Amino acid sequence: MPEPLSVPIFLADGDFLPMLGAMPWLQALVYVLIAVVLAVVITAVTAFIVRRIARKKAWAGVLIKRARMPFRIFLLVLALWAALQATALDPGWREGLSHTFLVLAIASGTWLVCALAIFLEDLGLARYRIDVADNRHARRLRTQVLIIRRITVVAAVLLGVGAILLTFPGVSAAGASILASAGLISIIAGLAAQSTLANVFAGVQLAFSDAIRVDDVVIVETEWGRIEEITLTYVVVHLWDDRRMVLPSTYFTTTPFQNWTRKNSELMGSVEFDLDWRVQPDAMRDELHRVIEKTELWDHRVAILQVTDAVAGYVRIRILVTAVDAPTLFDLRCYVRESMVSWVQQVSPQTVPHARVELSETPLETDAPRKKTTPSSTPPDALFSGDARSALRGSQFTGPVEVQKVTPDTPVDEP
């Protein structure tokens, strides 16, 4: 232990008294003031150097923002702890204060480590921008870095708490028994927190499996939205109407969902119409191309019109168009639908769907007297029976059967 510092103080009557040596608390106060001044000077010099660097380098500004406060507190705690060790206080007081400063040093050091880890991760994120058109790789790295940041912070905090607990003699002495019962405790904790641990592992899996990324457009629970945040236990989806849907991480590892930006953001959408048989597809197709060329919503990839069905008195027209992303595609489909409805009403009103009813005075066939007929053993126009060709066709589904060899000269039984 260093010898107490004795500094003669000049009093008004000319006497010199070793005041500091005789008053340990006054000595401690002087050392504390010196430590505070020294910490302030070091902090000011460091801040001056980093600010000069920040004029030319952007990373220095990020470092100041992240680590300024924890660095100052950590440096001040170390300076006060060193000043306390140089004083001649009572051993009981000094031991208690020394332990307090040790705990503060571990806590502030953990804070500084977390700030530096976040700073390094910010540097990595700054290299990959997500406000550009082709940002799939950047969004993937951003998702992984955010998960790594949370894991790093949690690990640092756990280590810091463990180091603080080990500074207490009671906890250190009980370490052997705690390690001996760690297996049983881990089993109990695993059973109690099974769902939580499953979400944690699912969150890590999502970060590195590239199933979803921040800003991905997804369809979950029949809702359309954007991945806003991915944590270790849950995922926040920003829905199209500004609602937030919070889903556990296990949802995306156990439930099928749609990811509209898995590879790229370009999408294709359809617009369908049920029109009358008098519709002219060629004229409607010309109108589609005229309308779509006037809008910037279309990405000039696909714009086609096809007749996909014609039953039950209606002709189904399907229009396929493409856009750069999901929001643009939604607006484009609404624009095409509105334009084609206006064209039908103004230019081709005969294509509006009609319900037709035919009135006839001729008696129905069911009202005529029925003739007695003998049912045939084979129905007419049978697909899998009735002649050699039909039987051969049916054998492909029921197994081989004995059929007559079919040649161009072989007569075929007429129904």
Image: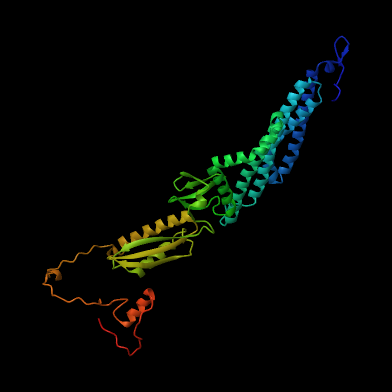
Q: Residue at x 35, y 82 (%)?
A: 402
Quadrant of the rendering where the N terminus is positioned: top right
Identify the colour scheme used. rainbow
Q: Is residue 382 above or below residue 77?
A: below
Q: Residue at x 33, y 81 (%)?
A: 389
Q: Nearer the viewer, residue 363 or 331?
A: 363
In the rendered image, the residue lying farthest to the left is: 369
Q: Residue at x 75, y 31 (%)?
A: 78
Tell me the quarter of the picture where residue 64 sits: top right
Q: Is residue 17 above or below residue 269?
A: above
Q: Nearer the viewer, residue 21 or 257?
A: 257
In this picture, residue 25 sits left or right of residue 70:
right
Tell me, yes or no, if residue 69 can be seen here: no
How many numbered discs?
0
Tell me, yes or no, if residue 152 can be seen here: yes
Q: Residue at x 61, y 43 (%)?
A: 150
Residue 210 % position (x, y): 57, 54
Quadrant of the rendering where the C terminus is positioned: bottom left
Residue 277 % position (x, y): 29, 68
Q: Nearer the viewer, residue 221 or 335?
A: 221
Tell me the quarter of the picture where residue 283 sits: bottom left
In this picture, residue 193 sits left or right of residue 92:
left
Q: Is residue 212 above or below residue 37?
A: below
In the rendered image, the residue lying farthest to the bottom is: 409
Residue 307 % position (x, y): 36, 68
Residue 116 % position (x, y): 69, 42
